Image: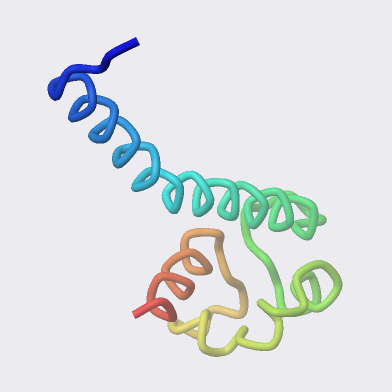
């Protein structure tokens, strides 16, 4: 079977798109895992983790709790955790 130049270019482009999408897929999987751990740690189901809930269910969050809780409210939300993680990647 002979491939034309266009076919090879199209296959190369498709492969490049798939390779480029891998980090986004991996990141999405990671965030789903973080969300699941947050939900499990949130024992009173109020959408917030107290320091005690974080210690029991998300020890890494507990370690950085004061940095994540920038407003000093005594709790952290999933959004605050994801924002903290994004800041750490920079």
Residue nearest the viewer, comparing 75 with 85: 85
Seen as rendered, the residue at the extreme front is 1
Residue nearest the viewer, comparing 57 with 47: 57
Q: Which colour scheme is used?
A: rainbow
Residue nearest the viewer, comparing 48 with 83: 83
Question: Left or right of 14: which side holds 18?
Answer: right
* Placement of 17 over or under 26, stated as above or below: above
Taking the spot 52% from the left edge, 80% from the top edge, the residue there is: 68
Taking the spot 30% from the left edge, 38% from the top edge, the residue there is: 17
Residue 6 image position (x, y, % from top left):
13, 21
Question: Left or right of 59: which side holds 80?
Answer: left
Residue 27 image position (x, y, % from top left):
50, 54
User: Which of the image's four quarters has the N terminus?
Assistant: top left
Question: Left or right of 13: which side holds 49?
Answer: right
Residue 11 image position (x, y, % from top left):
28, 27
* Placement of 79 over or under 74, stated as above or below: above
Seen as rendered, the residue at the extreme right is 56
* Placement of 49 over or under 35, stated as above or below: below
User: Which of the image's four quarters has the C terminus?
Assistant: bottom left
Taking the spot 57% from the left edge, 89% from the top edge, the residue there is: 66
* Placement of 61 over or under 48, stated as above or below: below
Taking the spot 21% from the left edge, 19% from the top edge, the residue there is: 7
Residue 53 image position (x, y, % from top left):
79, 70
Seen as rendered, the residue at the extreme left is 6
State the count of labels. Answer: 0
């Amino acid at each position: 079977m002979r491939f034309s130049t266009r076919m090879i270019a199209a296959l190369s482009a498709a492969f490049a798109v798939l390779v480029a999408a891998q980090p986004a897929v991996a990141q999405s999987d990671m965030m789903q895992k973080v969300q699941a751990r947050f939900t499990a740690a949130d024992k009173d189901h109020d959408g917030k983790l107290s320091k005690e809930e974080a210690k029991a269910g998300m020890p890494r969050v507990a370690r950085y709790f004061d940095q994540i809780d920038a407003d000093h409210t005594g709790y952290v939300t999933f959004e605050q955790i994801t924002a903290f993680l994004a800041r750490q990647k920079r």
